[in-house]
Amino acid sequence: MRIAKTFAETRLVSSGEIGLVPTMGFLHEGHLSLIEAARRDRDNDTVVMSLFVNPLQFDRDSDLARYPRDAERDIELAAAAGADVVFAPDVDEMYPGEQLARVNVKRLSEPMEGPNRPGHFEGVATVVAKLLAGIRPDRSYFGRKDAQQLAIVRRMAVDLSFPGTIVGVPIVREADGLALSSRNIFLSDAERREALALSRGLMEAADAAEAGETAASRLTGAVLEQIREGSSVSVEYVMLASQDLVEPLSELDRPAFLALAAWSGGTRLIDNVHFDEAEDGFRADRGTRLQSKSVLYGNAGSREESRDAVDNRHR
Ligand code: PAF
């Protein structure tokens, strides 16, 4: 596997069609599933993973400073998952001067995560645009866990005429159903138990939708019922929105996702189920489940060290 520090070097060591997996590092199986998806796609000759903690998408300097970095571990995991090249630029390569040109995908950035994270999606869209322009991938892989981000990136690529395809990859869940996130290491055993109500609720809603329920109020109600029943989790939003425009829906009548954000103790979690059109209605994408403990727990040192290293609001 090659490690490249510049766009030019990345293009030089990549041949044929390129599959790109953008990351900010501190990899877990969610990221590895993106690399594996890129590797599985036989049209990709070279799989490039970018590893860059993007200052533009943090609204607080302290969060950026505390963001965990372990390039050596990330490079090892990326190689084992099948990456050919890791593009690990310095800030100067990505932002040689003040970044005056910014990408703002209007409307799609406003609901859900928008109010909670001012400027975040502008930072994401801008860095992804730079990666697409600098690496020129044929396909780029993003997790469905960040459903709103995926919609924004897709729309940005269309509106700015980037060639290449944006591929959405199913959520990876821990064995008990909790959607994989670096922030999971913050949860105490009790908080974790309570947080399981989130995925349980989404699975109930998925069953209901597949049985023909289309009313958004009933689908969100199924989630809220689970959460209220057994937990002190505090919900920020549960919303059904269209996959393309992130438009709030009252009926499941087009490809959509049912998404939530909630706090378990001091940790903010997001999760969702996507509903894709099928012959006889909608098929729920519930994600995949790990069979064993995540690399998050094994490789990130002790639980206490991990807690110190990871910002609990942002990943
Ligand atoms: O999802 C992420 O890890 C980041 O938002 C991304 C897409 C790599 C941009 O920095």
Image: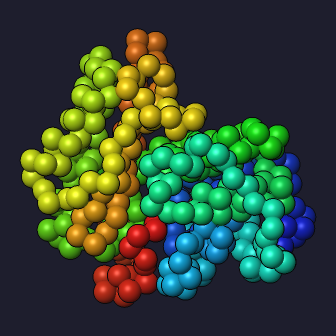
Can residue 249 be seen in the rendering of this structure? yes
Residue 283 relative to residue 51: left or right:
left
On the rendered structure, is 163 left or right of 254? right
Left-right relation of 311 to 51: left
Quadrant, the N terminus: bottom right
User: Which residue is located at x 44 percent, y 49 percent?
Assistant: 112
Give the percent coordinates (x, y) of residue 279: 46, 12
Vertical placement of 267 versus 233: above or below?
below
Q: Quadrant of residue 298?
A: bottom left
In the current view of this chain or complex, which residue is farthest to the top? 280
Image x and y of residue 90, in percent: 75, 80
Residue 184 figure quarter: bottom left
Q: Please, is residue 233 above or below residue 278 in the view?
A: below
Q: Position of residue 5 (x, y in %)?
A: 79, 76
Residue drawn 28% across the image and 72% down it: 266
Estimate the x, y position of residue 40 in percent, counting from the top left: 62, 44
Q: How many marks?
A: 0
Residue 150 is left or right of residue 161, and the answer is left
Residue 128 visible within the image:
no
Q: Residue at x 13, y 48 (%)?
A: 228
The way the protein has been coloured in the rendering is rainbow
At 33% across and 49% down in the image, what residue appears? Answer: 237
**Of 207 and 61, the residue lying toward us:** 61
